[in-house]
Amino acid sequence: MKYVRLGASNLEVSHVCLGTMTWGRQNSEAEGHDQMDYAVDQGINFFDTAEIYAVPPNKDTYGKTEEIVGTWFEKSGKREDIILMTKCAGPSFPYIRGGNNKISGQDIREAVEGSLKRLRTDYIDVYQLHWPNRMHPHFGKHWPEMVVPHLSTDVAREEEETLLEVLQTIQDFVKQGKIRYFGLSDDTPWGLMKYQELARTHDLPPIVSIQNEFSLLHRKDDPYLAEVCVIEDIAYLPWSPLAGGALSGKYLGGARPEGSRWGIDERKLFRDTETSNAAIAAYKKVAEKHGLDLCQMALAWCRDQSFVTSTIIGATSMEQLKSNIAAFDLVLSEDARSDIEDVFRKYPVPF
């Protein structure tokens, strides 16, 4: 296992980050514990979770994943061995703090204390906002005109005041020793730089990492947000490097294997398009041509992007987890990389 510094922090994290979002719905507590045991045995020291998990989210499973991580910490005694990330939900569901329409300092205070209790720990290494308050071009809303920015001075001022309140609240928790570093998720170059500007101006915690969706099917952060991350020394952490499992090829032709995420997700599956299916089929042919497992090829490609710090993986079975972790030892040939790029140029924005 290789390790790298997490942005401008002093944390050394594994190139593989263990995602946890299926625990508590698709996976049991025992299965979650087994996955953490195996991951640690493979040298992984970096876990990612969130208050909203398990996914697909609903009221009954809210907080379940953090609870599973917490019972593993208690059982294993390995809290000090793990760099732990968790996230505060943005404006969302009515069962999360009444469905507030923005993240405020009070929201963060309630969310942090709730996560600490469920995780059975007294500190969080990297605390993140799961998504921003404003409408933003993520979760399938990245086509032109789907998100129209507001140019109102009043709107911009209000947004800036909220971001400052967020940073001030994070600073309070840093001083208390309950949070070590601050990160974002599902944000944009503007959001990233506005936080950095406010942090510098007011001597508040800077952003050390951002996790966004990134895969062979979703490369919109390269090169623009990638440039910000490199220059600002912010760790870039891809989530869903297999596009919600789509890059396994198991959903091709409308298949919905029993127990799979797409089989139980009641929400609109924005990644399920005719063009996505065509792209996946083309990547599958590349993998077959070079004698590669499709999932491992996609993960190894993600790892090789110059601005990627650590890649967040997840699995519902131990077999999947072992295969996914093994992918980070895979060396892609120049011919395979070239063939992958040819497919991308044909299907640059498939969903």
Image (spheres, rainbow, N blue to C red):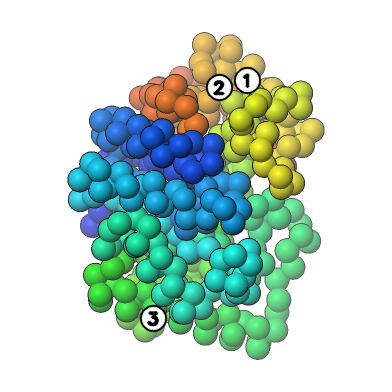
> In the image shown, does 74 or 324 lie closer to the viewer?
74
- In the rendered structure, which disc, 1 or 2, sits on the residue that comes first in sequence? 1
Q: Find disc 2 in the rendering and name its residue.
A: 294
Q: Amino acid at mark 3?
A: Gln
Q: Position of residue 341 (x, y in %)?
A: 59, 30
Residue at mark 3 to residue at mark 1: CA–CA distance = 48 Å
Residue at mark 1 to residue at mark 2: CA–CA distance = 6 Å
Which of label 3 and label 1 is nearer to you? 3
Query: Dot 2 surroundings within 10 Å: few (below 14), some, or many (20 or more)?
Result: many
The quadrant holding residue 7 is: bottom left
Q: Find disc 1 in the rendering and name its residue.
A: 284
Q: Label for residue 130? A: none
Q: Amino acid at mark 1?
A: Lys
Discs 1, 2 touching: Cβ within 8 Å: yes
Q: Secondary structure at mark 1?
A: helix
Count of all numbered marks drawn on residues in the image = 3
- In the rendered structure, which disc, 3 or 1, sits on the residue that comes first in sequence? 3
